[in-house]
Amino acid sequence: MSIELWGFPTVEKPLSSKDIWEHLETLLGASAGRLLGEQPQLLHLGSHRVVQEDEMLTPDSYYSFHLAVPTTLSLGMSVNKKNSLDEQDFLEEYGRNLTPEKIQRLVEAWKAIGYTFSIITGAGRSPDEPLLFVCLAAALAFACEGYVINTGDYGYIQEKYGLEIGVYTAEEFSRAIPKS
């Protein structure tokens, strides 16, 4: 079964793979070298073309990861309007940990930016993938001053990391990550 975490930025800021790697290394701590390797790569899904460190990631693009350990992780960036995503409905459904006022502020910020990111871990995960999965979601949120949305896929995040269905800042979400 595939499990997905969603997220969104709150500021208009170009996002590069370098941004992701820097935050991911910090979150992984002492395990970063073993898990990421010396030259982790972000690849365009399908073509397998390597995303250069200074290349900006773009909405309506999909990526996979080439790391030191096996992984089924992928990253999707999609334009909300093209996918008929209603930010208000989405945050009202999953922002159970937010006040109505906070939801409204986030809806406005998310609509202004206009895209969503999703991190997917596929079936057949390696033992290291659950940690990489949550660290990657937090790294993306840190890199774009955004939020991570736990929609409750199969209760996985709640069971493994103690986070209820909700919308979390990068800092809040990263607190659930086991420290190495």
Image (spheres, helix red, strand yellow):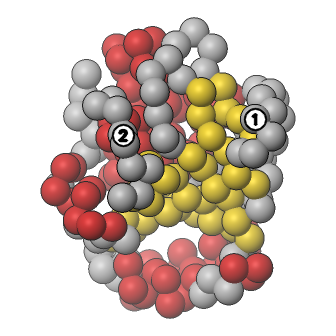
Circle 2 packing at 10 Å, graded few (<14), some (14-19), many (20+), is some
How far apart are the alpha carbons under marks 2 and 1? 20 Å
Q: Residue lying at the far front in this picture: please name it.
A: 124
Residue 48 circle label: 1
Three-letter amino acid code at disc 1?
His
**SS at mark 1?**
loop
**Looking at the image, which residue is at 64% across and 56% down?**
76
Left or right of 162, for residue 148: right
Q: Is residue 9 visible?
A: no
Q: Nearer the viewer, residue 178 or 154?
A: 154
Q: Quadrant of residue 159?
A: bottom left
Rendered view: 116 above or below 84: above
Rendered view: 58 above or below 110: above
Q: Identify the residue position indicated by label 2 in the image.
A: 125
Sequence order check, earlier mark of 2 and 1: 1
**Looking at the image, which residue is at 21% across and 60% down?**
158
Q: Position of residue 142 (x, y in %)?
A: 53, 44
Q: Position of residue 23 (x, y in %)?
A: 52, 32
**SS at mark 2?**
loop
Rendered view: 95 above or below 147: below
Q: Nearer the viewer, residue 40 or 102?
A: 40
**Looking at the image, which residue is at 39% across and 86% down?**
93
